[in-house]
Each structure stands twice: as structure tokens, then as C-alpha cells.
């Protein structure tokens, strides 16, 4: 079992703050500043361009990809890093659509993160006539699967409610109908055990700045199943996905394996930050994280429901069907969240009425959960949200 007291000490957490938003932006590991400073001063500063070879910068995307692979049940050598998640969604979808021609429909659900839907709709527009993004309610995905669908694109854990899709069952049913599956693990990687290989997933993508603590704007990851990779044509065919980037050929030839899913120059400073947080992730088992996460979430739900009758649970009550977050509906959720934040409990708000709290066992413990409950109770019981200063909308909610 993980010593969660010890892991908590590895993170920089401001005094007086209970950070229940690691599902949106993970906090800073204490070791990250030095690691990034070394990359800046000793590598960039001293080695300059020779850092690409001497400091191994060029190998960072696949090296870190292998460490993330362990957390998501991917085969080693089949995950690489780079770009933002929106770009990786596009890339995976474009490859999958091409592999499943002449089918023209992408199926997703209305609970998906809008950027995924926007990227899919944009791709359909580019592909042209007859291409279509079809969305159905999350509960209706199963029955909407048919031989007309080319690609099923789902986010395993709903960003608003934490509701989980059954990845294994949906993948199996979709594949039986000849559909390829693209799974978005933005709220899964580092939150719960994922078994891409065991689920026979086709493509997967995800984020590192949420649960994996790579810092704002940290690079995304992409996975392509070994059985597909040599056939997957990278629609974003950048020079670093080329078989021989430094041959400077005029014609594109896709690289070996997952390397072809690289696009351009990797973000070395951000990868250095991720390298430092992966030093923590390398030492933990996702089953331990999951057990503790469910316990923390259950404790939070029980405490809030016992003290705040105006908050209505938006997340599944069954911990095994929920990601690592708990959400509540409240009509004045935005103002209430601002009032809670002003008292040092950091969660966030998702339109139209969701107050969202993330639970991340590496640095959140039972004491934090209890303290958060009592602050939320104070805000609700005393209608502290009903003040003008909490109703001003910020750019980022
Ligand atoms: C956070 C998140 C994104 C964000 O994409 P970026 O391009 O990294 O900003 C996309 N999709 C899902 C499902 C997310 O949760």
C-alpha cells in the first residue's frame, strides 16, 4: 500500500489551501522546480543545440510515453507525447476514420468535453460530403452503435459528473460491428486503473496537466494499438513523425511504430516537468490510488449530503462507476463555488450548475475532506454565496 502521508510531502501545497482541483490542473511536485531549472541552466544554457543528443531531449517523448503506458495498461513502445490533447484527439480520429473508410460517421456523446466534439466536427467538415459527427446521450451510446459508424469517440470519465463508460464492454460491442474506438483518458490517466491492452482499445489519448502534474500546458499523450500502428497514417504528418527527420526528404514517410504520431519539436521544458512528476508516478500502483480515491469520494458525499440539503449529487453514487471526482448540482453553483474558494477550498464550476471537486489521494487526505465539508456547510447554511462579489464571472471558471 502507498504511504500517502509520504506522497503528500512530495507536493508543494500552499498553506491554508485545500486543493480539490487536481483533476483540472495538478499541483507542483517539489522536485519539479530543480528538474526544470537543471534543464534550463545545465542543458539549454550550457549545451545549447547539442542538448538534443547529449541530454537525450529527442528521446523524452517515447521515454515518458513508456512510463505513462504502465499507468494505462498500454504495451511499452506504443505511447508518445506531444501537442495538446485537442490536437491528439484530431490526430487519432483522422487516422481511425481513414482506416475505416468508406464509413463516414463519428459517434460520440453529449457529455463529452466540447473540444473533442469541436475537433471531430472540424475533421468532418474537412473530409467533406457525407461525413458526420453524431452525438447521443451517454446512456444511449450502446444502442446507437451500428455498421454505419466508422469511429466511436468517447471520454471514459465524464468531465462534469465523473460518470464512467464501460470501456471494455463498449469497445467489444463496437468492434463486433466493425467500429474503431478512440478513448479519451483525460480524466482517467492517474485517476484510476486503465487497461487499454485488456480492453483491446484501438486508439487512446489523454492529458498530463490534470492528474499527472506536468503543469499548465503540459503535453498530451497518444496510444495506438500495436496491431494498427503500421497501418495508421498520421494525418498530421510533421517532420518528427518522419522515418528519417534529418534526411530532410521532400516526401513524407511515416516513422517506425508510435514515433509516427509525433508532429513537431517536443516541448522540452514541459517534458522536464513531467519527467519529475513521473518520478512519483513510477512508484505507485493505480489499484491503491483507486481504493483510496473511492474512500475519499464516498466520505465527501456522505459529509456533504448530511449537512447541505440544497446540493444534489450529480455523480454516480456507486464508486466503481465514478471517476476520481464528485459533483453537485446547485442553482447558484458558480457563486457558491466562488464563496468556497474564497475560504480556501479550491474546486471549480462547470456550466450550467455543477460544483466539481477532484480527489487525488497522493496529496489529499481524510482531514482535507472533513475540512472541506465544514467550509461548504458554512457557505450553504449561511447563504454566503448570496453576495455580489461572488457573482462576478471570471474568464476561467
Ligand atoms: C481537459 C480536456 C481537454 C483539453 O484539451 P487541451 O487541448 O489540452 O486544452 C480535451 N478533452 C477532454 C476530454 C478534457 O478533459
Image (cartoon, rainbow, N blue to C red):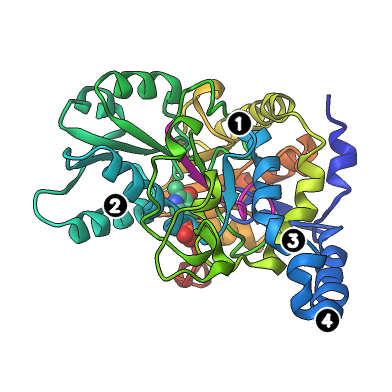
Residue 243, above or below 106: below
Question: In the rendered structure, does residue 203 fall within the stretch colored magenta?
Answer: yes
**Residue shown at the point (66%, 34%) measured from the top left:** 71
Q: Identify the mark nearer the N-term, 4 or 1.
A: 4
The residue identified by callout 3 is 273
| Label placed on residue 120 | 2
Q: Are marks 4 and 1 in contact (CB under 8 Å)?
A: no
* Residue 36 locus on image (x, y percent): 80, 67
Residue 337, above or below 393: above
Query: Magenta residues, as a range?
Result: 202-214
* Residue 334 locus on image (x, y percent): 46, 58
Whole-number angstrom distance, CA of label 1 to CA of label 2: 26 Å
Quick one: 12 or 14, which is closer to the camera? 12
Mark 2 or 4: the one toward you: 4
Secondary structure that dominates the magenta span: loop
Q: Identify the mark nearer the N-term, 1 or 2.
A: 1
Asked if residue 335 shows in the view, the reply is no
**Residue shown at the point (17%, 42%) measured from the top left:** 104
Q: Identify the mark nearer the N-term, 2 or 3.
A: 2
Whole-number angstrom distance, CA of label 4 to CA of label 1: 36 Å
Whole-number angstrom distance, CA of label 2 to CA of label 3: 30 Å
Q: Residues within 10 Å of mark 3 (few under 14, many from 20)?
A: many
| Label placed on residue 75 | 1
Quick one: 289 or 294, which is closer to the camera? 289
Whole-number angstrom distance, CA of label 1 to CA of label 3: 24 Å
Question: In the rendered structure, does residue 293 fall within the stretch colored magenta?
Answer: no
| Label placed on residue 45 | 4
Q: Identify the mark nearer the N-term, 2 or 4.
A: 4
| Label placed on residue 312 | none
Amino acid at each position: 500500500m502507498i504511504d500517502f502521508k509520504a506522497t503528500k510531502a512530495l507536493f508543494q501545497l500552499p498553506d491554508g489551501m485545500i486543493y480539490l482541483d487536481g483533476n483540472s490542473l495538478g499541483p507542483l511536485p517539489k522536485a519539479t522546480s530543480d528538474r526544470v531549472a537543471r534543464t534550463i541552466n545545465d542543458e539549454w544554457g550550457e549545451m545549447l543545440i547539442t542538448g538534443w543528443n547529449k541530454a537525450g531531449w529527442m528521446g523524452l517523448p517515447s521515454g515518458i510515453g513508456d512510463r505513462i503506458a504502465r499507468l494505462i495498461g498500454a504495451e511499452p513502445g506504443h505511447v508518445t507525447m506531444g501537442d495538446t490533447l485537442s490536437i491528439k484527439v484530431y490526430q487519432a480520429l483522422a487516422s481511425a476514420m481513414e482506416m475505416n473508410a468508406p464509413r463516414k460517421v463519428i459517434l460520440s456523446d453529449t457529455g463529452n468535453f466540447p473540444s473533442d466534439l469541436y475537433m471531430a466536427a472540424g475533421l468532418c467538415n474537412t473530409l467533406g460530403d457525407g461525413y458526420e459527427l453524431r452525438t447521443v446521450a451517454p446512456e444511449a451510446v450502446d444502442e446507437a452503435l451500428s455498421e454505419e459508424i466508422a469511429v466511436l469517440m468517447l471520454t471514459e470519465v465524464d468531465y462534469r459528473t465523473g460518470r464512467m463508460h464501460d470501456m471494455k464492454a463498449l469497445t467489444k460491442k463496437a468492434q463486433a460491428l466493425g467500429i474503431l474506438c478512440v478513448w479519451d483518458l483525460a480524466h482517467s490517466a492517474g485517476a484510476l486503473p486503465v487497461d487499454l491492452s485488456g480492453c483491446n482499445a484501438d486508439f487512446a489519448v489523454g492529458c498530463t496537466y490534470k492528474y499527472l502534474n506536468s503543469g499548465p500546458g503540459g503535453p498530451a499523450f497518444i496510444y495506438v494499438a500495436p496491431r494498427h500502428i503500421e497501418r495508421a497514417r498520421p494525418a498530421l504528418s510533421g517532420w518528427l513523425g518522419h522515418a528519417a527527420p534529418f534526411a530532410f526528404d521532400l516526401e513524407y514517410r511515416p516513422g517506425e511504430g508510435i514515433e509516427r504520431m509525433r508532429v513537431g519539436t517536443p516541448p522540452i521544458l514541459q517534458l522536464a516537468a513531467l519527467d519529475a512528476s513521473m518520478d512519483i508516478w513510477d512508484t505507485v500502483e493505480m489499484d491503491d490510488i483507486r481504493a483510496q480515491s473511492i474512500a475519499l469520494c464516498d466520505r465527501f458525499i456522505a459529509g456533504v449530503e448530511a449537512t447541505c440539503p440544497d446540493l444534489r449529487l450529480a455523480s454516480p453514487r456507486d464508486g466503481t462507476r465514478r471517476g476520481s471526482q464528485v459533483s453537485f448540482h446547485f442553482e447558484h453553483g458558480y457563486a457558491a463555488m466562488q464563496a468556497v474558494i474564497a475560504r480556501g477550498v479550491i474546486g471549480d464550476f462547470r456550466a450550467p450548475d455543477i460544483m466539481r471537486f477532484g480527489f487525488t489521494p497522493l496529496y489529499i487526505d481524510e482531514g482535507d475532506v472533513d475540512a472541506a465539508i465544514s467550509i461548504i456547510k458554512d457557505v450553504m447554511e449561511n447563504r454566503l454565496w448570496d453576495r455580489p462579489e461572488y457573482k462576478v464571472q471570471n474568464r476561467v471558471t
